[in-house]
Amino acid sequence: MSSLHEFLTMGGYAAYVWPSYAIALVVIGFNVAAPLKRLRRLKSEIRRRGGRA
Amino acid sequence: MDKYSWAWFHRFASPPYVYRVAGLLAPWFAWAAALSIAAGLYGGLWSSPPDYQQGDGFRIIYIHVPSAYLSMMCYGLMAVASAVGLIWRLKLAHAVAVAAAPLGASFTFLALITGSLWGKPMWGTYWVWDARLTSELILLFLYLGFIALNNAYEDPRSGDRAGAVLALVGVVNLPIIHYSVVWWNSLHQGSTKFFGDSAQMATSMVVPLLAMILGITLLFAACLAKRLQAELLARESSASWAEEAAR
Amino acid sequence: MTRALLALAGRDLRLAYRRRGEVLTPAMFFILVTTLFPLGLSPQQELLRSIAPGVVWVAALLAGLIGQESLFKGDFEDGSLEQLLLSPVPLQIIALVRVLAHWIVTGLPIVILAPLMGLFMNYPSDAMGDLVSSLLLGTFTLSLLGAVGAALTVGLRQSGMLMPILVLPLAVPVLIFGAQAAAQAARGEDPAGALYLLAAMLVLGLTLAPFAIAAAIRVSLES
């Protein structure tokens, strides 16, 4: 990689390389966020129900 | 087995213990993953030279190969967890399989999309029926089938066991499916075996690739740990340990 | 034990005979699906010959799958499936006999109709024997796989198309080798390799599927 320009355009393949990584970011991001969100929701439900099983 | 080893086993197989351990390990996995991925991306996207034939387009490999590798490893994990769950009647093992399935499906999906985007500039089309992509597609169906079957059951315990049987049938079938697809593909000279020959990779390519594989695997482990925690909490939400954990 | 198994097989066959209409639907489906291809593409003989092995095989696969749906349903609903669990005969063997009886009634007609479907698709008549062999070996393996799917979903209230979705990916190797054997025979090549692989898969299925089917039946009954 000799320049920022080459990095951004990926030697002409930018339309394929960057979407690949972007989609990867979305998919992985979802897989990180979803369980965290579910945990938060479960915990608050359990707290709310607290004691009354 | 003497009673001490059973005690160890039983402690390990208890949901609150695993919940705690998973919670402790997840951040470590995540940070290690971040480091490894950062190193891999730096090497892969910046410092390694463009490929002789494919220019900079080959750099998709750094996300495609780890995804494909993980998609298969995850299914193996699901199968082992399913076997453990069925043989030793461990609900915990089933929880691991159920938690892992969406992750595996996600990575299979990612492998397919990145493979397709890699293929477009190389072969001129977004989809070819080459052995690797076709195997990944069938693997995706296997994952989705497991998830669908698991969800179709009202009783989660039965759903676990049904999914486990399916996962085991699938894992026995997987090598057969892969072999048949490779054979089918080799018969028809039209398609090129594009992904096959990575034996000749330069060191500058291999090192970032290994870093990415390690990093994505660690990321998978972190996500799995969190998913497992959520799964355990959901399954045992009325237990006292769960109320403790929710505070 | 043999007497019990023969009684079971006999019962299955008698029941199937009484529900003849229902039981012949896979065969009719096979014919219909095959017919759709020339209608959907073109009646041109060369085209049909080139796609014949694949079309006949896919049609047979789908028809076989349709046939497997009803494998355990009836017995599940009236409680006889639970009774089978009480039998001294191992559930795995009962499952195998059940699949065999069911195949005789649903799979065998497909094998017998295959030459006619081959004719519809302009498949070369001197290769017909290999086409039939491939289907003979393949449809039984598909029955075994279908039975696993049927057993896994029999207890579900709204399984819809779930069973085919579960089984089709698993059926891919059988399809690949079966259709290839038929295609090789049509081209005049020796299909022995593919046929042996089909036979190997059948043996593997015969050995392992009964365990999966029995486990799946138990899961379905307990839910």
Image (cartoon, rainbow, N blue to C red):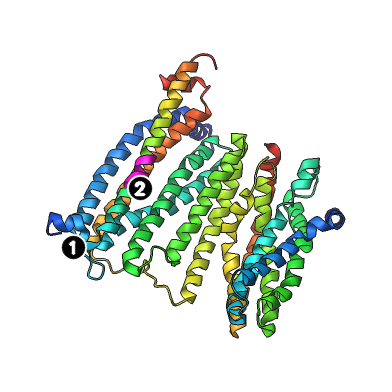
x 54%, y 14%: residue: A52
Q: Is residue C68 left or right of residue C178?
A: right
Q: SS for tag 2? A: helix
Q: Which range is magenta?
A: A24-31
Q: Main secondary structure of the magenta part?
A: helix
Q: Which residue is mark 1?
A: B49
Percent x, y for residue B243? 46, 19
- Mark 2, chain letter? B
Q: Is residue A49 left or right of residue C46?
A: left
What residue is disc 2 on?
Answer: B217
Q: How much space separates mark 2 and mark 1, taking CA atoms?
A: 25 Å
Q: Nearer the viewer, residue B166 or C50?
A: C50
> B108 above or below C139?
above
Q: Position of residue B221 (x, y in %)?
A: 38, 42
Q: Is residue C17 magenta?
A: no
Q: In the picture provided, is C70 more to the left or to the right than B58?
A: right
Specify the amino acid type for callout 2: Thr
Residue that appears at 37% across and 45% down: A27
Q: Tell which of C114 and B87 is nearer to you.
A: C114
What is the chain identity of the residue bearing mark 1? B
Q: How many marks?
A: 2
Say which quadrant the N terminus of chain B sits in.
top right
